[in-house]
Image (spheres, rainbow, N blue to C red):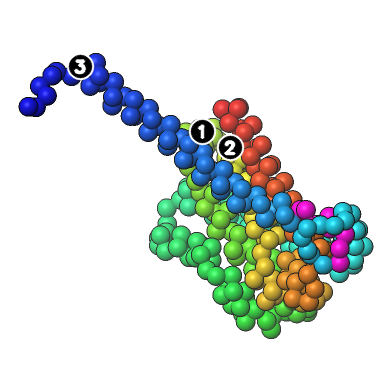
Amino acid sequence: MADTSIVPTRDIHVAPIARARMDAVVLRILTLTFTLFIIAYIAIPVVVTLVMSFNDAAVIRFPIKAWSLRWYADFFNSPQWVDALKSSVIIALGTTLISTVSGVLAAWAFERFTFAFKPLVYLLIMLPLFMPGVVLGLGVAMAFGDVSMFGVDIYGSRMLVILAHSLWAMPLVFMLMEATFRTVDHRIVEASYDLGGRPFQTFFEIVLPSVSTGIISSALFAFVISLNEFVMALFLTTRDTQTLPVLMWLSLRSAGTPRLAVASVILAAALFVSLSLIIVWYTRQLRKT
C-alpha cells in the first residue's frame, strides 16, 4: 500500500535552499581550484627559470648542486649580451614613443570626427595586430631592404626594427585609447570651445589630462610588447643590432648555459615591473574617483 503520509511544508522549502547553498559552495571550491591551477601554471616556469639563474654549473641542469651569482656577473661582463640588452631597451623606447603618439592621435580622431570609409580605415589600422609576426617581419624586410635614410641603409638598423614594432604595437594603443576616449565627458570639451578654447589647447589641456591613465598604460604595454618581440627582430636585425630575445635564440642553439636563464629573468622582471606600474596607477585612479 502506498505511503499517503503528508510531508511537512517546512521540509519542502528547506531542501531546495540547502541544495542551492551546497551548489554555491561547490562552485566556489571549483572556481578557487581552477584559479590556483592557472596561477601555478603561470608561476612555475618563472620560478624554475629564476632558480636556474642562480645555478653555478656550466649547463642548465636540475637539481642544483651549487648556488652562485656567477652567471649574473657573466651576463653583465659580456659586451655582446649587454649590447643586446641595450638594443632591446632602445628599440622598445622608440616603439613606445611612435606607437603611443600615433595611436593616441588616431584614437582621438576616431572618437571625435566622422569621415568617409571610417570602418575600412578602422580595419586597416587593426590589421597588423592580427597578422603573424613572420609575415610582418618578412614584409618590412622586403619593402625597406634597399631603402636608405640620410645616405645610410636602414636594413639591419634599430630604426627599422622600431618602425616594424610600431606597426604591431600601434593598433593595441589605438584600441585601448579608443575605449579610454569614450569615457571623456564631451560636455567639458564643448564648454572649452564655447569659452574660446582652441582645438589644440582643448586637446592638450582638457582631453589629455583626462585620459592620462590610459596613455601611460598603453605606453607600458607597447614597451613590453617590443621588448619581448622575437620574430620580426630575427628578420630585421644584424649581429650589431640584434636584440636580447634574438641573442637568446641563437645562444640556445649552440649552448644552453644558465646565462639564458639570467636573460629570461631580466625580461620577466621588465614585464613584472610594467604590469605592477599599470595596476598601481589604475588603483590610484580608482581611489580618486
Against 193, is 218 above or below? below
- The alpha-carbon separation of the residues under discs 3 and 2 comes to 59 Å
Q: Earlier in the sequence, mark 1 or mark 2?
A: 1
Q: Are marks 1 and 2 in contact (CB under 8 Å)?
A: yes
Q: Residues within 10 Å of mark 3 (few under 14, many from 20)?
A: few
Type of the residue with mark 3: Thr
Q: Secondary structure at mark 3?
A: helix
Q: Position of residue 266 (x, y in %)?
A: 77, 55
Type of the residue with mark 1: Ile
| Location of residue 120 (image quadrant) | bottom left
Type of the residue with mark 2: Ser
Please identify the quadrant where the C terminus is shown.
top right
| Of the two numbered discs 1 and 3 in the rendering, the one whose residue sits closer to the viewer | 3
- Residue 191 seen in the current view: yes
Residue placed farthest to the bottom in the image? Answer: 146
Q: Which residue is mark 3?
A: 9
Q: Position of residue 112 (x, y in %)?
A: 47, 47
Tell me the number on the disc at residue 210: 2
Q: Which residues are magenta?
A: 50-58
Q: Secondary structure at mark 1?
A: helix
Q: Residues within 10 Å of mark 2 (few under 14, many from 20)?
A: some
Residue 15 placement, left or right of 47: left
